[in-house]
Amino acid sequence: MRWELSQEQSDFRDVLAGWLTDRCGAAEVRAWLDAGDPAAFEDRFLAEGWFGVGAPEDVGGQGGGLVETVLAAEELGRVTAPTAGWLGAMAALPGLLAVPEEAKALLADGVVTVLGVPADAVPGAAPAVAADGGAVTGVIAGVLGADRARRLLVPVAGGSLVLVEADAAGVEVRPRVLTDRSRSVADVVLDGARGRSVPGDAAVALEAGALRAAVLVAADALGAAERMLDAAVSHAGQRRQFGVPIGSFQAVKHAAAEMLVTVESARSIVYLAAASLEAGHPDASAHVAAAKAQVTAGASRAADTALTLHGAIGYTWEHDLQLSYKRAKLDEHLFGAPAAWNERLAASLDLVP
């Protein structure tokens, strides 16, 4: 199946792609990664209205829907833009919508709030931290974007969510170093930290955050995979062996064709999952699980193929391929590995009479 975007959605994608081309080229990305500070990009991304794309206007978003947010994630993945804070915030958004002033602070005022869960697990799957009389204690390992956040939306034992200020007493944020330097994680140590309880059903909010995060990571992987395909095809047309371009070799043609199939099938899966989730389709969770599992795993395999076609130069810091390669490899495990999402998918199906 081939998914067709509306004209308005296609125009939105083209405008964002042009904006990113002008402001997020490889040289700029490398400068941010070398400095270890993507604030210049994050500030501009917020100031020019892209941060709240797909979120409700009544809480400071730019309107649109989840498909538009997915298109943004795809383009951000294509250029390897720093997105730790944005992705962490998008995962937290369903929980924050129960507190409109907090959602507005995130979307309109740039007070970044990220979901305080381990970045390598499906949100809601990891044990919650303890809470005693409003004081929260525990360690949350590897929270995506915690080093970029001003607030953390933390699941606590007993089935509730608590908003904790990142600079509050009893909160320590310990950044980690990732191979993919376009994203960041940090361990969050809570030692009697005080927070504000968030109303609503925490389990429902976490599930909504998990599904939203999964489809956005899948879209990010799609963008990275397409960029690697373009790079591999370009390299195969320029690199010569035995007096001819390596792209003329049958094995190289087959490898590139497999990458193309991966990219095009991923696009249909991701867009369908986004539209299904936005519409509240009964099978939306299965569609999202399939997208997260299959698209990120496919992008990871495509990364290996692209690296093989480039040879050893593809992984060197001097070559841009390594940016997308590392991006795709992290996407495979971000917010749950394919195995975890395949288990969720299997559990949702009537496989046994």
Image: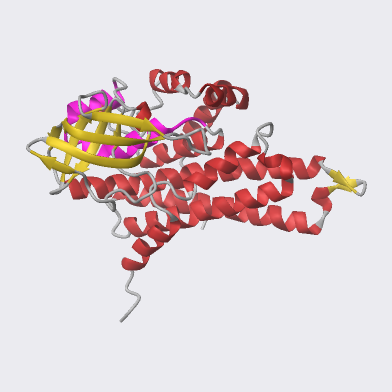
293 to 141, vertically: above or below: below
Q: Is residue 124 magenta?
A: no
Residue beneath the point at 58% across and 39% down: 324
Q: Would residue 172 be visible to someone looking at this image?
A: yes
Write the residue at 50% across / 29% down: 16
In the depicted view, which residue is nearer to us: 153 or 54?
Answer: 153
So how many labels did they put on this image? 0
Place of residue 9 in the rendered image (x, y in percent of width and height, measured from the top left)? 45, 37
- Pinpoint residue 278: horizontal percent, then vertical percent: 32, 46
| Furthest-bottom residue in this view | 353
In the image, residue 220 above or below residue 285 = above
- Image check: 5 left or right of 198? right
Q: Is residue 60 visible?
A: no
Secondary structure mostly seen in the magenta stretch: helix
Question: Which of 340/178 is in front?
Answer: 178
- Image x and y of residue 127, in percent: 24, 51
261 left or right, relative to 110: right
Where residue 352 sits, quadrant-wise, is: bottom left
Q: What range is drawn magenta here?
A: 81-108
Q: Which residue is at a point 80% across and 49% down the rendered structure image?
A: 247
Whether 99 is among the magenta residues is yes
Q: Is residue 177 above or below residue 283?
A: above
- Kindly give the residue lying farthest to the left in the view shown: 133
Relative depth, front residue between 162 and 238:
162
- The quadrant of the picture occupied by the C terminus is bottom left
